[in-house]
Image (cartoon, rainbow, N blue to C red):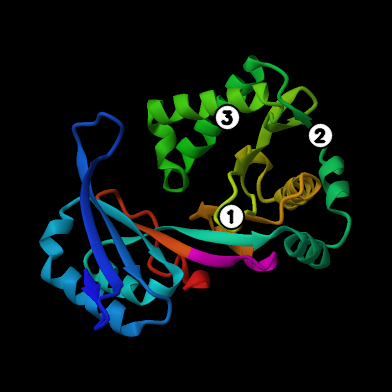
Amino acid sequence: MRRSKKQQLVAAVLITTVPVEFQSKIFERKFMILSMPGDSSSLKWAKSVLEENESLLGKRCSGKLEYWQKDLIPWFESKGIGIRSVLLHGDIDKSLRLLRAHYGKTLRESFEKAGLHILPARSIKDIDSYIRLIKSEFTKNPQFGATVKNPKFLKFVKMDQRNNMKNGNPPLLVYRGKTLCGGLDLIEVPAGLDGKKRAAFGINLNSKMQGKGLSRALYERILLELQKRGFKTYYGNTGQPGVMRMGKIMGRWVGGYTLDRGVARPFPKDHFKLWL
């Protein structure tokens, strides 16, 4: 920890050991850097501490950096610790306005022309079918959702979806006729210290339906739903190129980065250049 002359805490480097999964016998190191925005001396100090204690990070480690700490990313990358995802924030009203300005006001028409429609999940069977779709799609692209291979994670997602349905907040599912093609997950986040509630959401679409501009209509649909429920902002972690490109179009801003080492690096070095 680093303190100022007034003995105020101004920076800290935290390195802890945690199980990779709940009750797992495989462990990794977690790191966290605390510093004040705009304080370059704190970052310089943090880098020196990391250099002196590099061996503590081990062969398997992960951690998060705030956006103002991005100057540390080159050092981490030089040690084989790369970016796994970026945390993107967005203003709902602004994102909806920019989305429509960019693509026009016919987003819903393109969706309907494809023969698609959206219905809320109505039964446990619907939830289970949706979980199988998520697993299938992310298994094809594990770099964007490696955790779907974890049975415990899938069990948690299924339980969470079922609870949401019981609480009147079921996932919205995308169908072509009677065939399930995708879905929208809406996550309500408890209000922070500022008293404002936030939302996170996920969009999943069968790979055969991707690349046709349909996700744009899904973004509009879920932003309208969030707007109707009184949300003002939203956020989410992503490593997906399409989501990051859409984020620029919708005026989202970066809040931080997730870094890791110990799994196969799935992305080229310039994968996240839009957000650095």
Residue 117 badge:
2
Q: Which of marks 1 and 3 is in front?
A: 1
- Whole-percent x and y of residue 212? 72, 50
Precedes in sequence: disc 2 or disc 1:
2
The residue shown at (71%, 24%) is 121
If you read the primary sequence from the N terminus, does the residue marked by circle 1 or circle 3 appear first?
3
Instruction: Please say whether residue 250 is one of the residues in the magenta stretch.
Output: yes
**Residue in front for this viewpoint, 74 or 270:** 74
- Give the label, 2 or 1, closer to the camera: 1
In the rendered structure, which segment of residues is drawn in magenta?
248-255
The local secondary structure at tag 2 comes to strand
Measuring 31% from the left and 65% from the top, which residue is drawn there? 33
Q: Name which residue lies at 54% across and 28% down.
A: 160
Q: Which quarter of the rendered picture does the N terminus lie within?
A: bottom left
Marks 2 and 3 sit apart, C-alpha to C-alpha, by: 17 Å
Q: Mark 1 points at which residue?
A: 235
- Res. 261 visible in picture: no
